[in-house]
Image: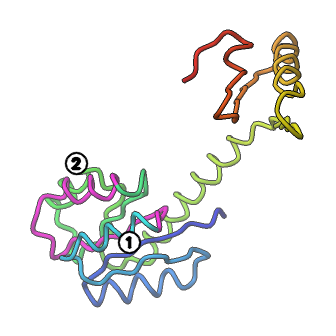
Amino acid sequence: MYPLTIGLAIENRDLWEQTQACLADLPFRIIVEHQDVGDVSSFLDRLERMRPDVVLVDISGWKEPLEGLVSSIKAVTGDPMIVALNTVPDAEVILASMRAGINEYIFPPIADPLRKALEKRSAERSRRRDSTKAGGKAFGFFSAKGGCGATTILCHVAAELGRQNQKVLLADLDLDAGMVGFITKTKAV
């Protein structure tokens, strides 16, 4: 199971206790704990610093449109899984939550649905991580001093790898001279 990091913003005492009891048995790490859902700005600051994989938000006392909350969370953390926790299974609130972009809506008892949602996210992350392992190789060319031909050799090696139908990313980290662009007659991006 892929280890996930979790951010919590839960004000309701019962939801807090059920969530803590559920997460205690799972191999996930809570990196943000926030118990004042009304103070969104400090919660968003902490999310931006820590960037959790999953954000659990108590919406039982939320009065504003959920679109604003969801877009704020996604703006500071990228694309976390957002799980809305509520004390009641209200159809209107569930529909509004899904339309706002919340991934999961969970109400008490929350242990089993929360566990399944987190395991699903963990499996997705694990598959994504495994599929990004391309098995590529990285080569670094360093010279003892400028002017001894390392950039020229690098360009010839990259050209030969290209002729052998290998994918090549050529990065010139010499920010002063930047001779790779000159030698290969390309423009910098």
Q: Residue at x 69, y 35 (%)?
A: 173
Horizontal side, residue 50 vs residue 63: left or right: right
Locate the N terminus by quadrant: bottom right
The residue segment tinted magenta is 50-75
> Gap in Å between the C-alphas at discs 2 and 1?
25 Å
Percent across and percent down for residue 167 are 76, 22
Horizontal side, residue 34 vs residue 164: left or right: left
- Disc nearest the viewer among 2 and 1: 1
Percent across and percent down for residue 92 are 13, 58
Q: Is residue 165 above or below residue 12?
A: above
Quickly name the residue at label 2: 99
Residue projecting furthest to the left? 63
Towards the viewer: 44 or 121: 44
Q: Amino acid at mark 1?
A: Arg
Horizontal side, residue 185 vs residue 29: left or right: right
**Does 132 appear in magenta?**
no
Residue 46's label in the rendered image is 1
Res. 172 image quadrant:
top right
Circle 1 crowding by C-alpha within 10 Å: few under 14, some 14–19, many from 20: some
Horizontal side, residue 55 vs residue 64: left or right: right
Percent across and percent down for residue 18 are 39, 85
Q: Residue at x 24, y 82 (%)?
A: 36
Percent across and percent down for residue 159 are 82, 14
Secondary structure under the numbered disc 2 in the rendered image: helix
Q: Is residue 46 above or below residue 165?
A: below
Q: Residue at x 84, y 20 (%)?
A: 152
Q: Amino acid at mark 2?
A: Arg
